[in-house]
Each structure stands twice: as structure tokens, then as C-alpha cells.
Amino acid sequence: MDSFRGFGLLLFRLFLGGRIFLGVWDNVVNSSKMAEFASFLDSFKVPYPNLAAPLSVYAQMICGILIIIGLQTRFVALLMIINFLVAFFVVDRHLSLEQMTPALAMLFGAILLLFEGGGRFSLDEVFDRKKSE
């Protein structure tokens, strides 16, 4: 089983990073979706929603890609923890446990990556190996 070590974390990174990336992709390619997201943020009294919306969207898009490839995983996970905590306290805390479960899963997934890093099949591992040689 030791030869399979790291595959679970790889699959998890692919899922979480892909979900983060795909979750914001429509806002990146469709300006009306971005405006709709800014309006959504405004309805929750988020300051500067026209700045906050693209900042959140592009941060998630870039972080999703970095999680998928496993580059700067712990730092990126920390950024996503902050992002998901803000989302939780602004929006999701008003929901039932069942409704907030997807957001909590994303938050706890980011926490897992903060503690575990990118794992064996990540660019972090490749660069760490090169440093130690």
C-alpha cells in the first residue's frame, strides 16, 4: 500500500481545486455573471462589491489552479481559508446546516491542505526535492 501513498491527496487536490476553479469560471467569462455576483455581495452589505467580486473570483480561480498542480499549496490553502471564512460569516451563517455543508466542506478541505500540503504528487514536492539535493 505504501506505493499508493499520496494518491488520495492528489485526487482530493484535483477535486477541490477543480471545484474552486469551476465554481467561479462563469464569472470570469461572463461579465453579467460578475455583475450579478457583485450585486449579490452588495445585498449582504459587503463593502465595495464591484471590487470585492472580481477580487474574490480571480483569487479563487488562480488558487484553484495552484491547488490542482500543487504549487504553494499551504499558502494558497490559507488564502482560501480566509476567503471561505468571509463567505461563511457573510452569507452561509444564515443558512441551515444542510445548506451550509458545501461551503463548510470547502473550508475544511482548505484546512486539510494547510496541514498536509500538496503531497507526494505536487509541484511543491518536486521543488522541495530539488532544494534538498
Image: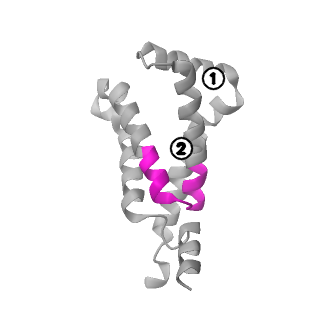
Q: Nearer the viewer, residue 7 or 127?
A: 127
Q: Which residue does the numbered mark 2 point to in the structure image?
A: 20
Left or right, 13 with reference to 114: right
The quarter holding residue 122 reads bottom right
Looking at the rendered structure, which numbered label has been put on residue 74? none
Kindly identify the residue that appears in the image at 58 percent across and 57 percent down: 68
Asked whether residue 73 is drawn in magenta, I would say yes
Image-quadrant location for residue 80? top left
Label located before the other in sequence (1 or 2): 2
Task: From the viewer's side, name the closer residue of 85 and 47.
Answer: 47
The residue under label 1 is: 33
Q: Nearer the viewer, residue 9 or 84?
A: 84
In this rendering, position of residue 92 left or right of residue 18 = left
Q: Secondary structure at mark 1?
A: helix
Image location (x, y in percent) of residue 105: 38, 45
Q: Residue at x 40, y 52 (%)?
A: 109
Q: Residues within 10 Å of mark 2 (few under 14, many from 20)?
A: many
